[in-house]
């Protein structure tokens, strides 16, 4: 049934989890603002600096060699434009250029931000090396021996800031009356590097003189006069509306000549040129005469610069309308050097060249288009043909054109050099470009704001357009192209709209999602309300770049085969020969038996099957392989297997099987048993004086070197090695009796101490090397600890002697993150009494995790062909029975070979079921020459359970540091249709009991298939391959149209996408027409299958009708005889509601619209119902009913009792569906709506979060976002059938999106790129306070947010830990006191507890999360943010507090109530000294721990405003911190890693 309003619970208050909010980016912006070619990293490198909103990316072009520089080089897997450095900027980048000083061989980067700030930076190799080699983020590297390391504390980013400032600081008149330029900011750099001109404010040109003698390698004092720039100034100009500007190429004798393209009041466009007089700090206008001045310095040898002759100064009037770009053309090289160059003007209908000095104008007509970007075509060697100038030009449709300027110069150098001809040729189509950069060798970087950025190659000869076919309507230019796409870089922007699609649970995916009919809506509602992991489905792009993007968290496993098989308890992959790369056998252990599947050639298996059936006429030859049941004679098949693996000792190539009563060695060639040890007879133990031990084997582990450790019932541990003297035999080397039963064993060898050429499992000259382990890790039942035992006998520790006993409890450390190297003092029985059985160690893994970090990240003089440098960390992972994973870094002592210690304890929740740890090597780890940024390359660990997770090591933040840290990515199953060429796939969560890595070149077509896994749950075994290991994966589906709205309809299993077609909107424009001289855009709604993305149906709208809202809802169908206030319903049905408006050209505001009700039935996947079919299970899209409205339906929101709220122009109405005549539903208004807004853009309520559960609140509340008047809170009164305003925010905020976090806390975004939080004072005593929504949080995001929506990209954690990843539903939030925490968690100094979870999508393509924080969590993170901003030096010297301050129209207020999650999580990448400095600052501050211990605002009524401020702490509410409560680096690391996993 639909949700109904109920009384609130008295046990909890969800508002207490919304004391503050944590804003963090999940997927960074991909929209390219601008890009520039430079040599930033090294003098001889070809780098591309790319501005993406608040980030600056540096990519390096790897020039192809002559051998592979051909038309087939796109097949080369080497990345040609890898990302080497990412720099966060405290501001939205607007312009970017490179500047090279006389004494420097490298380029500096100069950029400006949206608020009028600027900075000049350069790459610092010294800082890069310090971040790389000075310290790392682990305790093992804390004591750096580098004496200079302390001087680099806070220098996190490998760049040096040479100058920074704000343009408003140079003129009070600009601050008082200047407004930002409407078409700006614009920037131009003098070709002779004399000055930089910017148009930031209307009526002014800002000039920054360049000090060419500045040396970037020396330390200079602050100040523009002694730095790289001289005193800047604002020069007033008469031209108000500037469209473009550029410096002309002149001789050194002339003043810099600045050409301006401007538009007058009548709409005509002109070009005029002014001189820039740096010494006089002004402009010399076109018609003025420069006065001769004596040089101020009589000793100066430089002649005074002058203006060119008046008749040579460039000027042209009434150019082609729609022109927007000027391209400076240098003067002819054969002419007098005193002549001025000309300009090329890019217009909408023609390209014009004009030179006043030469007195010529050349025009070439073009097809109507808007030209957006250009770049010169010049090879890196600098050689250019003097008679030909070439430019690449990109338009709004994505076409790339070649503009050729021909001069009158012969090959011998004769001729007057005048421009004779312009050619404008189309090369092909790419993404709509906002930036073009020619890299050389025909490669071009195409940066886009509206689609994916690309690296393309210009071909010498045209090739057919891929997928274009032979369409007679297309011209020859459309059917052929000179461009080939080599690489694509994901850009989700602009995210116009997005929705959440819950992942399917594998256990019930088929029954719960495919066979739904209308009567099962109640179960469907329950399924939606189970807080499953979600995929974000975005409507992105413009026109032909319009796409639907699926963004999912975690690692995808592409399912290649699945078979129903129940009861699997263990699996192992075996190679036929130790030296082989492929596995030949898959050993499966069941309760009473062992089965073995073998890899066979598909052709041989098919022939055997046909011979059995007597059919041999099929001539087809199947390729690949199959898994078939086989038998290994030497294995015991009637016993369950405890362990199986390959063993190589000397020349003996063996297979190992351990069962409950024996250890067996089998010859890999004959598959016959070679030797056996049994638990009852002791056979094979010739050197032991003990008799056979009459007990059963319970746990076993071994490695490839022949080391075997087994545990017998009763706590006896036995250690064997395979002896290769003569014939293979098992030799028992040690035995120890423990006081408890053994639960788990692991003796994997560490690889960090082994040279890279001899790593275990790596191919070295065709031979695989097996490495011995020095220790074994064991876990005991009823004991919350892990023991490390020695496998090397010496005077200090005998064989199986205890090296270290590790207490798994957080209180078991020494306060500094270290653990005792001897047995702990506390009684294990006390541990057993305080910890439940589920918290015992169930699985152990000794592993060396490694990640590949290219040396190019910091050392710029190396090439990508250099072998990648690996960060290796020895770790002990412990999987507990309640879904927790505990990790330790293992530090080897240098004094003794067996001595070791552990530190850096981290605990995370991966689910609620027991964990089994399976190490495997990912495929990317063996791509030695490739750079895999942000990917988990190398050795990884799979943690099984209800949330199977890959644990891997990452090497830091994009080139700034190699600080290793653990990362976690959940696995989702990708069910792929082999018949689909585009690889469309659906994703669902899986449950994994057991897993094993399994590689086979016959079963998998990929050559790098060593990342394939075999996993099994209770009923099914699956074989598949792991995708690239990264946090977020993006899948794209092209629409060819501009999407405007999107909704996922779970009942019909379809994506509903509202699109704009028409002339420029993409293909298939629906009902396009020209009515009244206006073009109808042809809006439509398209329905796509959620698995195959096949288009199921399409609804074309009427002329001039546009889509404003689209929502998937569940409506209650009421009886027509029931009164409006009645709650009795016939049934609940899922529908798709489409809100539209008729945008007639003569109307400023729509006066007509309608709401369409559409029903979608999932039916059989891929089958569309015809008119003659009546089967209810057949898929169809049916138009049920519609309701006309007197305005545009801007927003739709589900409401209580199966109704919906609509905002129509300035009104808010309640609607419900009732059964009309002929049993057809009718949508109608209920009661009177609310009137009182300028334009009601959006409406939200909490009803959408609960379909089957009752809502917490008695009052039926909703919030409405207005175009200009911020947010209002309205309430529906069922008794009066009316909607009334309860409270409102009286600030003037121009809203873009809203979200209702709880019944009293609301989140909003406005068009100045800010976020703010409002609070409803329902318990206030005065009426004045109750009708006002108080602002309790303000924050500058830096990007415009198009939508806010409650939800999360991660799977919610339902365990009972202190870290609560609650869903966005207010009814499920829990604030837990310290007494409620699980054992051992009460010793934790920091507990991360969150409330609501909200996702946001921006115009620039960012997806982020806003997490609600309780009081103690917010106080800790606020204190950490203050410490980090005071210590870490920002890029460009632009302050963090200044950037995050709430900034609107003539309004600036400090940020409060928010924490910058992007800044907080950079703590994981800092060097150890900087970490310690930050923690010391927090301990000195003392405000990280507040007195209310998470009770929020209950005791902080008077100091609420001070408490919410993230920059000013709460002196009165902070208690003194004792020595025992001091934070350590590991405490903060653990807390930051926890919260980083919650988004």
Image (tube, grey):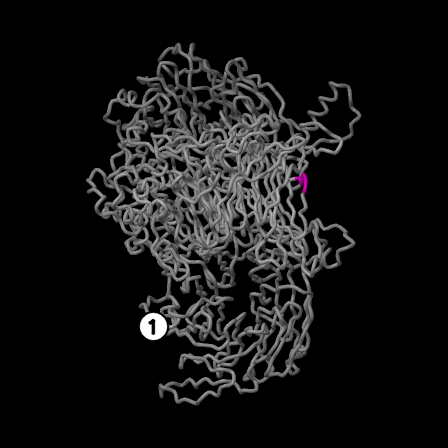
Q: Nearer the viewer, residue 648 or 748?
A: 748
Residue at 48 percent across and 69 percent down: it is: 187
Q: Which residue position is annotated with label 1? A: 226
Q: Nearer the viewer, residue 276 or 766?
A: 276
Tell me which secondary structure the magenta stretch mostly adopts.
Answer: strand
**Residue segment shown in magenta:** 1094-1098
The answer to which image quadrant residue 391 occupies is: bottom right
Determine whether, in the image, residue 832 is placed left or right of residue 929.
left
Q: Position of residue 1516 (x, y in %)?
A: 21, 46
The answer to which image quadrant residue 344 occupies is: bottom right
Determine whether, in the image, residue 38 is placed left or right of residue 776.
right
Q: Is residue 670 part of the magenta span, yes or no? A: no
Determine whether, in the image, residue 973 is placed left or right of residue 945.
right
**Quadrant the C terminus occupies:** top left
Q: Position of residue 100 (x, y in %)?
A: 45, 69
Q: Position of residue 54 (x, y in %)?
A: 45, 56
Q: Position of residue 879 (x, y in %)?
A: 40, 28
The answer to which image quadrant residue 860 occupies is: bottom left
Q: Nearer the viewer, residue 259 or 1344?
A: 1344
């Amino acid at each position: 049934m639909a949700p109904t309003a109920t009384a609130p619970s008295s046990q909890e208050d969800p508002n207490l989890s919304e004391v503050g909010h944590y804003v963090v980016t999940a997927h960074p912006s991909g929209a390219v603002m601008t890009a520039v070619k430079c040599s930033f990293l090294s003098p001889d490198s070809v780098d591309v600096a790319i501005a993406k909103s608040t980030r600056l990316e540096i990519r390096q072009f790897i020039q192809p060699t002559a051998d592979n520089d051909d038309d087939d080089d796109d097949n080369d897997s080497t990345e040609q434009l890898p990302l080497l450095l990412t720099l966060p900027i405290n501001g939205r980048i607007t312009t970017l250029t490179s500047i090279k000083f006389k004494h420097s061989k490298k380029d500096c980067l100069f950029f400006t931000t949206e608020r009028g700030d600027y900075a000049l930076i350069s790459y610092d190799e010294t800082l890069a090396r310090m971040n790389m080699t000075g310290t790392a983020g682990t305790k093992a590297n804390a004591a750096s021996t580098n004496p200079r390391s302390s001087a680099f504390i806070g220098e996190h980013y490998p760049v040096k800031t040479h100058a920074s400032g704000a343009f408003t600081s140079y003129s009070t008149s600009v601050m008082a009356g200047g407004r930002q330029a409407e078409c700006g900011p614009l920037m131009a750099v003098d070709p002779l590097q004399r000055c930089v001109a910017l148009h930031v404010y209307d009526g002014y040109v800002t000039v920054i003189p360049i000090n060419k003698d500045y040396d970037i390698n020396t330390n200079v004092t602050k100040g523009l006069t002694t730095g790289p720039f001289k005193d800047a100034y604002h020069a007033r100009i008469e031209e108000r509306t500037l469209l473009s500007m550029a410096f002309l190429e002149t001789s050194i004798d002339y003043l810099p000549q600045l050409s301006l393209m401007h538009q007058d009041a009548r709409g005509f466009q002109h070009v005029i040129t002014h001189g820039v007089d740096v010494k006089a700090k002004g402009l010399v206008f076109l018609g003025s005469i420069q006065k001769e001045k004596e040089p101020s310095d009589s000793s100066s040898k430089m002649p005074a610069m002058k203006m060119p002759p008046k008749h040579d100064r460039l000027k042209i009037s009434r150019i082609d309308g729609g022109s927007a770009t000027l391209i400076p053309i240098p003067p002819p090289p054969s002419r007098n050097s005193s002549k001025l160059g000309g300009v090329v003007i890019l217009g909408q209908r023609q390209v014009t060249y004009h030179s006043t000095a030469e007195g010529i104008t050349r025009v070439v007509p073009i097809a109507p288009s808007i030209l957006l970007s250009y770049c010169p075509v010049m090879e890196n060697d600098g050689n250019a043909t003097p008679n030909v100038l070439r430019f690449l030009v990109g338009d709004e449709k994505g076409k790339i054109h070649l503009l050729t300027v021909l001069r009158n110069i012969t090959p011998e150098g004769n001729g007057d050099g005048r421009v004779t001809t312009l050619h404008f040729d189309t090369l092909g189509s790419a993404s709509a470009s906002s930036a073009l950069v020619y890299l050389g060798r025909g490669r071009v970087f195409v940066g886009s704001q509206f689609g994916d950025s690309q690296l393309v190659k210009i071909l010498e000869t045209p090739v057919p357009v891929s997928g274009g076919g032979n369409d007679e309507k297309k011209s020859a230019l459309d059917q052929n192209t000179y461009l080939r796409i080599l690489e694509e870089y994901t850009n989700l922007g602009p995210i116009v709209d997005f929705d959440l699609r819950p992942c399917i649970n594998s256990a019930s995916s088929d029954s719960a999602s495919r066979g739904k009919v209308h009567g099962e809506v109640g179960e469907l509602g329950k399924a939606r309300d189970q807080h499953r992991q979600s995929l974000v489905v975005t409507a992105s792009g413009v026109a032909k770049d319009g796409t639907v993007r699926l963004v999912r968290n975690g690692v995808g496993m592409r399912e290649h085969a699945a078979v129903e098989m129940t009861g699997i308890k263990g699996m192992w992959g075996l190679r036929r020969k130790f030296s082989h790369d492929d596995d030949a056998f898959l050993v499966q252990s069941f309760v009473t038996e062992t089965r073995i599947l073998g890899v066979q050639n598909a052709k041989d298996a098919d022939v055997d099957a046909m011979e059995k059936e007597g059919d041999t006429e099929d001539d087809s030859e199947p390729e690949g392989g199959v898994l078939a049941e086989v038998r290994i004679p030497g294995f015991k098949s009637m016993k369950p297997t405890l362990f199986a693996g390959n063993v190589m000792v000397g020349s003996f190539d063996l297979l190992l099987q351990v069962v409950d009563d024996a250890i067996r060695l089998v010859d890999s060639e004959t598959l016959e048993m070679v030797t056996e040890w049994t638990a009852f007879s002791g056979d094979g133990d010739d050197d032991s004086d003990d008799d056979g031990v009459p007990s059963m084997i319970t746990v076993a582990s071994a490695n490839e070197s022949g080391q075997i450790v087994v545990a017998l019932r009763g706590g006896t541990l036995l250690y064997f090695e395979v002896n290769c003297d003569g014939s293979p035999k098992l030799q028992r080397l040690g035995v120890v009796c423990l006081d408890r039963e053994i639960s788990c064993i692991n003796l994997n060898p560490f690889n960090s101490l082994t040279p890279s050429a001899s790593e275990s499992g790596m191919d070295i000259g065709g031979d695989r090397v097996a490495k011995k382990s020095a220790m074994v890790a064991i876990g005991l039942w009823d004991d919350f600890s892990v023991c490390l035992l020695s496998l090397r006998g010496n005077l200090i520790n005998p064989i199986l002697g205890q090296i270290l006993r590790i207490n798994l409890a957080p209180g078991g450390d020494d306060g500094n993150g270290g653990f005792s190297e001897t047995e702990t003092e506390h009684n294990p029985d006390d541990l057993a009494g305080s910890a439940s059985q589920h918290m015992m160690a169930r699985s152990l893994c000794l592993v060396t995790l490694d990640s590949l970090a290219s040396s190019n990240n910091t050392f710029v003089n190396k090439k990508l062909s250099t072998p990648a440098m690996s960060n290796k960390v020895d770790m002990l992972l412990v999987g507990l029975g309640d879904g927790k994973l505990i990790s330790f870094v293992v530090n080897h002592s240098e004094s003794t070979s067996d001595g070791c210690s552990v530190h850096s304890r981290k605990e995370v929740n991966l689910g609620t079921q027991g964990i089994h740890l399976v190490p495997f090597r990912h495929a990317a780890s063996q791509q030695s020459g490739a750079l895999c940024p942000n990917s988990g390359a190398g050795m990884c660990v799979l943690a099984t359970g209800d949330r199977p997770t890959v644990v891997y090591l990452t090497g830091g933040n994009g080139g700034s540091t190699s600080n290793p840290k653990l990362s976690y990515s959940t696995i989702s199953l990708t069910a792929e249709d082999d018949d689909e060429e585009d690889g469309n796939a659906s994703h669902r969560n899986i449950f994994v009991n057991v897993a094993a890595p399994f590689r086979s070149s016959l079963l998998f077509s990929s050559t790098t298939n060593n990342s394939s896994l075999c996993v099994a749950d209770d009923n099914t075994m699956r074989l598949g391959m792991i995708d690239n290991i990264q946090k977020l994966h993006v899948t794209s589906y092209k629409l060819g149209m501009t999407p405007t709205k999107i909704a996922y309809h779970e009942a019909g299993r379809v994506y509903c996408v509202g699109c704009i077609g028409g002339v420029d909107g993409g293909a298939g424009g629906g009902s396009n027409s020209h009515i009244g001289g206006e073009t109808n855009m042809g809006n439509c709604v398209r329905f796509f299958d959620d698995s195959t993305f096949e288009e199921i149906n399409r609804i074309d709208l009427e002329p001039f009708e546009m889509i404003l809202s689209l929502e998937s809802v569940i409506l209650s169908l009421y009886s027509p005889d029931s009164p409006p206030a009645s709650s009795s319903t016939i049934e609940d049905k899922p529908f798709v509601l489409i809100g539209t408006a008729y945008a007639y050209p003569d109307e400023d505001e729509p006066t007509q619209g309608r709401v369409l009700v559409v029903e979608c039935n999932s039916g059989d996947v891929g089958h569309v119902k015809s008119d003659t079919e009546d089967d209810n299970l057949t898929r169809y899209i049916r138009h049920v009913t519609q309701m006309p409205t007197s305005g545009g339906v801007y927003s739709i929101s589900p409401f209580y009792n199966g109704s919906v709220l609509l905002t129509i122009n300035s009104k808010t109405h309640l609607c419900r569906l009732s059964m009309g005549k002929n049993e057809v539903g009718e949508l109608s208004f209920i009661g009177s709506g609310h009137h009182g807004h300028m334009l009601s853009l959006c409406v939200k309520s909490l009803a959408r979060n609960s379909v089957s559960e009752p809502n917490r609140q008695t009052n039926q509340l909703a919030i409405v976002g207005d175009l200009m008047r911020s947010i209002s809170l309205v309430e529906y009164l069922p008794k009066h059938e009316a909607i009334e305003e309860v409270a409102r925010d009286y600030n003037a905020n121009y809203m873009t999106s809203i979200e209702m976090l709880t019944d009293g806390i609301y989140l909003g975004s406005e068009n100045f790129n800010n976020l703010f939080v409002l609070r409803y004072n329902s318990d206030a005593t005065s009426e004045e306070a109750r009708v006002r929504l108080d602002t309790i949080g303000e924050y500058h995001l830096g990007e415009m947010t198009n939508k806010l929506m409650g939800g999360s990209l991660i799977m919610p954690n339902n365990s009972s830990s202190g870290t609560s990843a609650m869903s966005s539903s207010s009814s499920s939030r829990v604030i837990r006191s310290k007494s409620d925490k699980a054992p051992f968690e009460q010793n934790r100094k920091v507990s991360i507890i969150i409330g609501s979870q909200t996702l946001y999508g921006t115009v620039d393509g960012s997806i982020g999360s806003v997490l609600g924080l309780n009081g103690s969590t917010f106080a800790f993170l606020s204190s950490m943010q203050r410490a980090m901003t005071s210590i870490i030096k920002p890029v460009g010297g632009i302050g963090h507090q200044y950037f995050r301050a709430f900034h609107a129209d003539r309004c600036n207020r400090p940020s409060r109530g928010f924490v910058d999650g992007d800044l907080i999580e950079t703590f994981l990448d800092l060097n150890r000294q900087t970490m310690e400095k930050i923690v010391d600052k927090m301990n000195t501050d003392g405000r990280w721990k507040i007195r209310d211990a998470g009770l929020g605002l209950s005791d902080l009524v008077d100091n609420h405003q001070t408490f919410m401020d993230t920059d000013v702490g709460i002196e009165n509410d902070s208690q003194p911190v004792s020595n025992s409560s001091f934070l350590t680096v590991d405490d903060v690391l653990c807390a930051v890693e926890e919260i980083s996993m919650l988004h």
